[in-house]
Image (cartoon, rainbow, N blue to C red):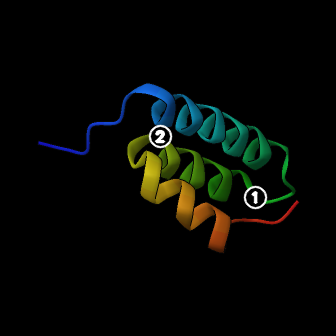
Amino acid sequence: MGIEVGGFFGLILLILNVWAIVKVAQSHASTGTKVLWIVLILLLPVLGLILWFLLGPSG
């Protein structure tokens, strides 16, 4: 139904998503913005990560 990610690529994606969530949580953005980015990264791991790299709050 969705995009299946496994193996080495899945591990790299997991590490990058955890790193992105930590960076979002440490940023100086408002609480609502942080929650929005974290939910986006969790629900859409690949697309959310790409969008965060391009448009996310800078720390």
Q: Is residue 8 above or below residue 36?
A: above
Nearer the observer, 11 or 34: 11
Is residue 5 rendered to the left or right of residue 10? left
Q: Residues within 10 Å of mark 1 (few under 14, many from 20)?
A: few
Residue type at mark 1?
Answer: Ser
Query: Judging from the image, what secondary structure is the residue with disc 2 in?
Result: helix
Give the spatial CA distance, label 1 vs label 2: 18 Å
The one nearer the camera, 2 or 52, is: 2
Quarter where residue 37 is shown? bottom right
User: Which element is circle 1 on?
Assistant: loop
The label on residue 51 is none
Q: Is residue 25 left or right of residue 9?
A: right
Residue 54 location (% of width, % of height): 64, 73
Residue at position x 69%, y 45% in the image:
20
Point out residue 40 in the picture as x, y percentages from the top left corner.
Answer: 47, 52
Q: Residue at x 72, y 39 (%)?
A: 19
Identity of the residue furthest to the bottom in this view: 55
Answer above or below: position of 2 versus 5. Answer: below
Q: Which residue lies under the disc numbered 2?
A: 42
Q: Quadrant of residue 55?
A: bottom right
